[in-house]
Image: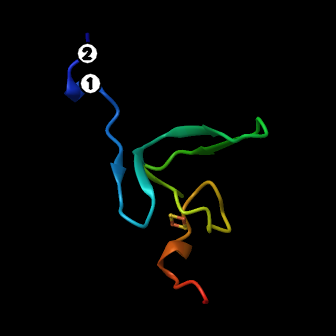
Amino acid sequence: MSGPEERTQIRVIRGGPMMVPGPVDIELPDGSHVQSDRFMVAVCACGRSRNYPLCDTSHRRRRRE
Ligand code: FES
């Protein structure tokens, strides 16, 4: 059994992305893959990124009522 130090640590930003240690390969629902070689990858959790599934900080903009 692996200890917590051996597990991938993902940090959830409230109202923002999930911070995942890179490099990563993300599989989308259509079966396509997006890769990032960054040290830390911000994965969009709000669904508003124009660069989905990667966060482009669109979560910071206020939604129009
Ligand atoms: S979490 Fe940042 S754009 Fe979606």
Compare residues 27 and 41 and report the one nearer the observer: 27
Residue 39 horizontal/vertical position (percent): 40, 48
Q: What residue would you read off at disc 2?
A: 2
Instruction: Give the amino acid at mark 1.
Output: Glu
Task: Name the quarter where the N terminus is drawn.
Answer: top left
- Residue at 52% x, 45% y is 37
> In the drawing, what numbered circle is on residue 6?
1
Q: Residue furthest bottom?
A: 65
- Residue at 62% x, 67% y is 49
Q: Is residue 65 left or right of residue 4?
A: right
- Residue at 44% x, 65% y is 16
* SS for dot 2: loop
What distance separates the C-alpha of mark 2 from that of mark 1? 6 Å
> In the drawing, what numbered circle is on residue 18?
none
Instruction: Give the amino acid at mark 2.
Output: Ser
Compare residues 1 and 22 and report the one nearer the observer: 1
Task: Name the quarter where the C terminus is drawn.
Answer: bottom right
Q: Are marks 2 and 1 in contact (CB under 8 Å)?
A: yes
Quarter location, residue 46:
bottom right
Q: Residues within 10 Å of mark 1 (few under 14, many from 20)?
A: few
Residue 20 horizontal/vertical position (percent): 41, 46
Number of on-image labels: 2
* Colour mapping used in the image: rainbow
Q: Confirm or reject: label 2 Cβ below 8 Å from ligand 1.
A: no
Q: Considering only vertical position in the picture, is 52 above or below 23? A: below
Q: Residues within 10 Å of mark 2 (few under 14, many from 20)?
A: few
